[in-house]
Amino acid sequence: MKLVVLANREPVRRVGERYEVALGGLAAALYPAIQARGGVWVAWGPGGQDERIELPGLVVRRVPISARRVAGYYRGFANQALWPLFHLFLEHFRIKRGWWRDYRAANAAFAKAAFQEGGPDALYWVHDYHLALAPALLREAGARWVGIFWHIPWPPLEVLSVLPEAEALVRGMLGADLVGLHTPDYVERFLEAARGLLGVRVTEGGVWFGGRFVRVAAFPIGVDVAGLRDARERVRERAAEIRAAFPGRRILVGADRLDYTKGIPERIRGYRRFLEKYPEWVGKVVFLQLTAPSRESVPAYRGLKSRLFRLAEATERRFPGAFVHRYAALSRDELLAHFAAAELTLVTPLRDGMNLVAMEYALVSEGLPLLSRFAGAARYLKGAFPVNPYDPEGLADALAEALVLSQAERRARRTELLASVQGLDVGNWTEGFLEALSK
């Protein structure tokens, strides 16, 4: 059965006069499934030429959306309304009615292009908060199998109700046959929203809506286990170079894109508190914070960047040689090499749908992650050190504990951690969701 994927971002990049598949993130997970079934990836495009790109095993259909509409649909409604609200950052929540009109129009354009590619008998897999209305639009067009996966957290009903269009959003998602989220907690909150906003009948495993049963279930996403094991060998030499650049120091690493949900300032404050409270470690550790630029056109992100730079510079001055902040978009292998070089990683989002950094780190390094209790991954990763990123004192204590683990304790935690990560292989996630949808 033909597979049609709808996602905001396309899985290709242009190299000179040609395109090639860019297998990172979601694309790496879905590409094998598209190859196996034959199918199309529908994504936002800049318009003009190359609205349909055909590569071996992959067709990309670009949906042309005007710059004005992108400003409302993507930078406005998706990133200044849905993103902060669903991550419980109401102080960054903004809403404009024009954004909602652009969001509806963009979703309609995606659904129309997708149905043109797949027709009534394809499997449609919609991804994430950019396209919440697309399932209902595909259903209205005549699609028979529609699934949506929600990659970010799902908030409690009282928070969701802040959004004027909350009912329409949930109604759009219930056009699907299968709604997937990362954790059972998110599933329960979604069911609460469906019951509270639409009055639908909730039963075990889903809801009845419009005369159909919509299954709602947890499908925790993972990483490419085999690919990361291969990468570990590939970056071994570069990792050794990074370690050699900090002789006599034990390396800690944090890696995030710029975002207020990632808890980067809170992490730095926790590390500073660690150095204050445990001065015996000064001169013996270095923390490398790798921050990738992101969404700098959004005011909240520009403000975050300024605050982060001030905090990083103050920390570097106060503890010379103990902290390094690198603000750049690193290559995939360079990022993995830093993971492989580090003894511990600090993965401390204030809120995250899942977070794959701790899993990637586990497979390319010999170390352990300190993992926020507020990341979806904390529910699944045994062996990690659970931390509260809002508590610098607790973060400092956890870091001190992790640095003095015995070899036996480290091995035991690593065994648990690797078993957890291997059980969340992204290939199994893809096939599990598609199998459930096709049934």
Image: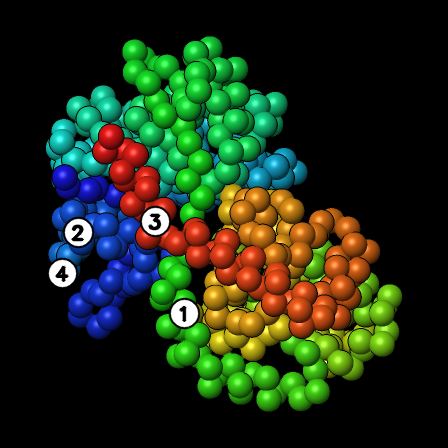
Sequence order check: which comes first, mark 1 or mark 2?
A: 2
Judge depth for marks 2 and 4 and give the one in front: 2
Query: Is disc 2 in contact with disc 4, using a CB cutoff of under 8 Å?
Result: no
Looking at the image, which residue is at 61% across and 37% down? 88
Read off the residue under disc 1. Answer: 229
Query: Is disc 1 in contact with disc 2, using a CB cutoff of under 8 Å?
Result: no
* Structural distance between the alpha carbons of marks 1 and 2: 23 Å
* Structural distance between the alpha carbons of marks 2 and 3: 14 Å
Residue 5, horizontal then vertical, whole percent = 26, 43
Looking at the image, which residue is at 51% across and 60% down? 418
* Structural distance between the alpha carbons of marks 4 and 1: 26 Å
Read off the residue under disc 2. Answer: 36
Dot 3 amino acid type: Asn
Relative placement, left or right, of 237 versus 259 is left
Circle 1 residues within 10 Å: few <14, some 14–19, many ≥20: some
- Tally of numbered tags: 4
Read off the residue under disc 3. Answer: 428
Q: Secondary structure at mark 1?
A: helix
Sequence order check: which comes first, mark 4 or mark 1?
A: 4
Asked if residue 191 shows in the view, the reply is yes
Query: Is disc 4 in contact with disc 3, using a CB cutoff of under 8 Å?
Result: no
Judge depth for marks 4 and 1 and give the one in front: 1
Looking at the image, which residue is at 48% across and 22% down? 191
Read off the residue under disc 4. Answer: 56
Query: Is disc 3 in contact with disc 1, using a CB cutoff of under 8 Å?
Result: no
Sequence order check: which comes first, mark 3 or mark 1?
A: 1
Quadrant holding the C terminus: top left
Q: Secondary structure at mark 4?
A: loop
* Structural distance between the alpha carbons of marks 4 and 3: 23 Å
